[in-house]
């Protein structure tokens, strides 16, 4: 397929290519520049609602304990302090 460039150096990808990649509006596409001046275009990931991630790691880790927001805040604070970040002491 050939595409004409606009004055600003852009071109529009048609629906046939988008369907081939399996992407829809909001999905991510990666373009890699190859040494022979060609491009490799790949679908890199779909934009999904956060709710779809619920239980996504259950198969890897088995049953995982549910943490409260306070527990998560404490874990983040401890991780930041352990890594040497400053300014996290006593933040609530």
Image (cartoon, rainbow, N blue to C red):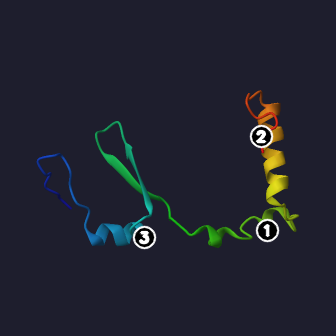
The residue tagged with tag 2: helix, strand or loop? Answer: loop
Q: Which residue is mark 3?
A: 22
In the displayed structure, does residue 66 sit left or right of residue 17? right
How many dots with numbers? 3
Find residue 35 and report its horizontal and vertical position in percent.
Answer: 35, 36
Q: Which residue is mark 1?
A: 59
Q: Considering depth in this image, is 76 or 40 the residue closer to the camera?
A: 76
In the displayed structure, does residue 17 sit left or right of residue 51? left
The nearer-to-camera label among 2 and 1 is 2
Q: Residue at x 86, y 64 (%)?
A: 64
Position of the C terminus, as image quadrant, is top right
The nearer-to-camera label among 3 and 2 is 2
Q: Which residue is mark 2?
A: 91
Find residue 20 and report its horizontal and vertical position in percent.
Answer: 37, 70
When the figure is inspected, residue 42 is found, relative to residue 25, above or below; the finding is above
In the displayed structure, does residue 86 sit left or right of residue 5? right
Q: Are marks 3 and 2 in contact (CB under 8 Å)?
A: no
When the figure is inspected, residue 48 is found, relative to residue 71, above or below; the finding is below
Q: Residue at x 25, y 67 (%)?
A: 14
Find residue 51 and report its horizontal and vertical position in percent.
Answer: 64, 72
Q: Residue at x 80, y 63 (%)?
A: 60
Position of the N terminus, as image quadrant, is bottom left
First in sequence: mark 2 vs mark 1? 1
Q: Residue at x 22, y 60 (%)?
A: 12
The residue tagged with tag 1: helix, strand or loop? Answer: helix
Quarter of the image where one finds residue 25: bottom left
Quarter of the image where one finds residue 42: bottom left
């Amino acid at each position: 397929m050939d595409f004409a460039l606009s004055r600003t150096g852009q071109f529009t990808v048609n629906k046939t290519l988008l369907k081939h990649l399996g992407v829809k509006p909001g999905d991510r596409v990666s373009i890699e520049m190859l040494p022979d001046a060609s491009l490799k275009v790949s679908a890199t990931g779909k934009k999904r609602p956060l709710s779809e991630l619920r239980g996504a790691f259950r198969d890897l880790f088995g049953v995982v304990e549910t943490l409260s927001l306070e527990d998560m805040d404490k874990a983040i604070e401890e991780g930041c302090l352990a890594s040497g970040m400053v300014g996290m002491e006593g933040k609530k």
